[in-house]
Image (cartoon, rainbow, N blue to C red):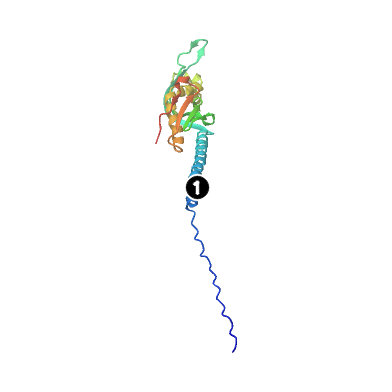
Amino acid sequence: MSESSPETSPVVVTVPAPKQRRFPWALFVVAVVALVLGSVVSTRVASMFQWGTDSESTNTQVVRSIELKQDVILLSLSVDAIATEDKGSHIGTWKIPGTGENVIMRYGSDAKLGLDGSQVSIEQTGESAYTVTVPAFQFLAYDNFTFETLVEDGGVLSGITPDIDKEKMANKLINDEVKAQHVSTNVELLKMQCETFYNNIVHAIDPNIVLTFVYTDVPADAAREGAARER
């Protein structure tokens, strides 16, 4: 009889099931919170820097708009006046009869009053507040100057009397004294025009800006706050 081989028992290998990993929810929550906080902080920081830039830009615009480099005409007056002049020949202090000459003239013009824009200064005194220092108002120019002779007559001997110089007569009507008088009689109106002019400029940049005006040619108590605030 043939000898039979012994039966071989099968080898059984048991592989343990993989352990199921649990998702770290706590770590996820912390990450989300950190992301949100980081976004909020960065937004606020960015807005702070943006505010500073806007404020600086506005201040620069205001200063540049105020500091003009030329004369600023604030007021134009229509001026009409009558002037007369008599002239005659004399011997010593005795006026020779019949030699008199009389001229009556009417003249008109547009007088331009204002200030030197390069002398205006501005200083920031608050977040939206500025002080504007205004120099003395000036007579700037005459435009459309005209004159005409209304009356010109003389005595029978007026031919021996030199003619009256009408151009010289007209020039006397626009001398420095007359120019200063135009300014002095219109100071209050010039102030109003000045404040309106500069307020209109800065309110085009920021309607919340308040300007305080200081006039160097008037007493300190005449300085006043520009009340015209256009919104």
Image point (50%, 47%), residue name: 34
Q: Tell me where residue 175 appears, x and y as whole percent.
A: 50, 23
Please name whichever residue, 35 or 204, is drawn nearer the observer in this view of the structure. Answer: 35
- Which residue was labeled with disc 1? 34
Check disc 1 and report its element: helix, strand or loop.
helix
Q: Name, please, the residue furthest toward the top.
A: 93
Quadrant of image for the C terminus: top left
Decide if residue 42 is in sight here.
Answer: yes
Farthest residue toward the front? 1
Q: On the rendered image, what quadrant is the N terminus found in? A: bottom right
Label 1 sits on what residue type? Answer: Ala
Label 1 neighbour load within 10 Å: few <14, some 14-19, many 20+: few
Q: Is residue 139 positioned above or below 25 on the image?
A: above
Q: Position of residue 23 (x, y in %)?
A: 49, 56
As drawn, 210 above or below 38 = above
Residue sitting at x 50%, y 15%: 89
Q: Position of residue 96 (x, y in %)?
A: 48, 13
Q: In this orientation, does residue 140 appear?
A: no
Q: Residue at x 52, y 41 (%)?
A: 49
